[in-house]
Image (cartoon, grey):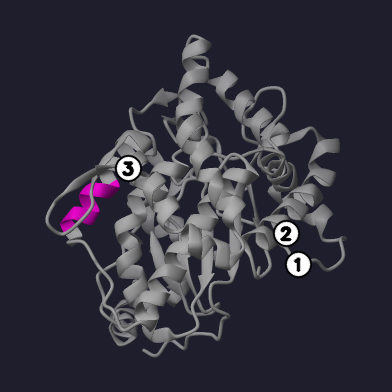
């Protein structure tokens, strides 16, 4: 099966952010996405899009193609403002995390689309339990021959991205002991999880041929790997991250992905092979990041040397600073320091729960406040300038 890879400008950025809809008073999820989307249809054309997702308690906001991370994040901010013009009068609050702290799967409704009903019919209990929210980061790649090598190299940094974004320590009313329970739930879908170590685009097309030919999937959009090619857009798409709780955090992680992809692209331009880890190390690192978040110690090279992920992220941010300057995302990338210092959303949620005697409704209210009151990217960057 051939899979044409669209033309895409190098290192451009696209973002997708899945948002929960909740009752402002109780924090319970509400199945009101169809109502919200219907009200939004009257709006005129915009750079962003707002769509439904698997469950009717979710809307997804998507940026246009950004030349910079800031461009894409500003699109997302505009989309959220548009959603709020509909949700605020209706008493609906927005929040984002990898999971809802206390919601139960059997209380949720599936969006009435054939693709979603087909997914649930095939995957049954696991599919119905996909009460997960995430971000997707697209980075443009100008040459299809670079795509699979970049995915292979980027897989070594999945634990770093997973740890930075970890925001699902609670599941169905219980503290799981994991920083990102979402990471382990999502991989239960048949075509989800870590990418297969494929050497080049021909091998990816061979994978698609096998999977489509045996009825496992309909097309490339049903490849749900943690990092996947997105042939329609001409991008590498990172899907491993839990939902982020604020715009500056989203911008920081997006900038990290952008500079990593550009770094690997430059290495290929120079004729150098990209480093990879053994698949068993990659799998172990994913589990460690899901379990321990930013406190994880990960395997960092093929010889089995190990690094504290928090320290490695800080080191990488410094090493990649010149590329960030070239891409115009220095200030966004600097947001990694805030996450490393103040903790991920998972850590913040656990602190709130402990301070409130385990009351998870207070955790939801914390997430609602954080999403609403957290600084916009404009405000965040202005503060950085002031310092």
**Which x, y percent locates residue 178?**
34, 33
Task: Indicate which disc, 2 or 1, sits on the residue closer to the N terminus.
Answer: 1
Q: Where does label 3 land, which residue?
A: 309
Q: Where does label 2 land, which residue?
A: 75
Q: Residue at position x 29%, y 58% from top? A: 156
Badge nearest the viewer, 3 or 1: 3
Q: Residue at position x 62%, y 35% from top? A: 29
Please tell me whether residue 18 is drawn above or below residue 148 in the rendered image. above
**Which x, y percent locates residue 304?**
13, 52
Task: Indicate which disc, 3 or 1, sits on the residue closer to the N terminus.
Answer: 1
In the foreground, 4 or 380:
380
Q: Residue at position x 39%, y 52% from top? A: 316
Task: Indicate which disc, 2 or 3, sits on the residue closer to the N terminus.
Answer: 2
Q: In which quarter of the image is residue 44?
A: bottom right
**Which x, y percent locates residue 321?**
49, 57
**Which x, y percent locates residue 336?**
50, 44
Judge the density around disc 3: few (<14), some (14-19), many (≥20) Cα neighbours within 10 Å: many
- Disc 2, disc 1: CB below 8 Å? yes
Q: In which quarter of the image is the C terminus?
A: top right
Q: Classify mark 1: helix, strand or loop.
A: loop
- Tell me if residue 39 is in the magenta stretch: no
């Amino acid at each position: 099966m051939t899979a044409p890879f669209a033309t895409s400008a190098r290192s451009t950025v696209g973002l997708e952010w899945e948002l929960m809809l909740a009752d402002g008073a109780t924090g319970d999820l509400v199945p009101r996405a169809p109502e919200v989307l219907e009200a939004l249809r009257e709006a005129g054309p915009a750079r962003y899009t707002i769509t439904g997702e698997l469950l009717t308690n979710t809307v997804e906001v998507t940026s246009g193609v950004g030349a910079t991370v800031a461009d894409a994040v500003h699109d997302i901010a505009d989309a959220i403002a548009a959603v709020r013009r509909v949700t605020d009068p209706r008493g609906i609050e927005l929040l984002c995390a990898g999971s809802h702290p206390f919601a139960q799967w059997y209380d949720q409704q599936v969006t009435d689309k054939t693709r979603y009903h087909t997914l649930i019919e095939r995957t049954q209990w696991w599919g119905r339990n996909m009460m997960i929210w995430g971000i997707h980061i697209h980075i443009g790649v100008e040459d299809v021959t670079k795509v699979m090598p970049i995915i292979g190299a980027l897989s070594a940094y999945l634990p770093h991205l997973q740890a930075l974004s970890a925001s699902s320590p609670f599941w169905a009313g219980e503290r799981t002991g994991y920083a990102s329970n979402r990471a382990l739930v999502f991989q239960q879908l048949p075509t989800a999880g870590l990418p297969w170590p494929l050497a080049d685009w021909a091998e990816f097309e061979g994978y698609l041929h096998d999977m489509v030919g045996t009825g496992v999937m309909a097309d490339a959009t049903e490849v749900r790997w943690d990092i996947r090619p997105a042939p329609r857009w001409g991008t590498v798409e990172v899907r491993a991250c839990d939902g982020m709780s604020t715009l500056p955090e989203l911008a920081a992680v997006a900038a990290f992905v952008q500079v990593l992809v550009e770094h690997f692209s430059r290495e290929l331009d120079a004729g150098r092979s990209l480093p990879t880890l053994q698949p068993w190390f990659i799998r172990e690192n994913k589990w460690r990041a899901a379990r321990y978040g930013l406190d994880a110690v990960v395997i960092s090279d093929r010889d089995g040397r190990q690094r504290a992920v928090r320290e490695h992220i800080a080191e990488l941010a410094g090493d990649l600073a010149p590329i960030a300057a070239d891409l115009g995302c220095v200030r966004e990338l600097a947001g990694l320091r805030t996450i490393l210092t103040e903790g991920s959303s998972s850590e913040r949620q656990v602190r709130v729960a402990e301070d409130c005697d385990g009351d998870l409704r207070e955790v939801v209210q914390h997430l609602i406040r954080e999403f609403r009151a957290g600084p916009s990217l404009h405000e965040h960057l202005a503060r950085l300038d002031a310092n």
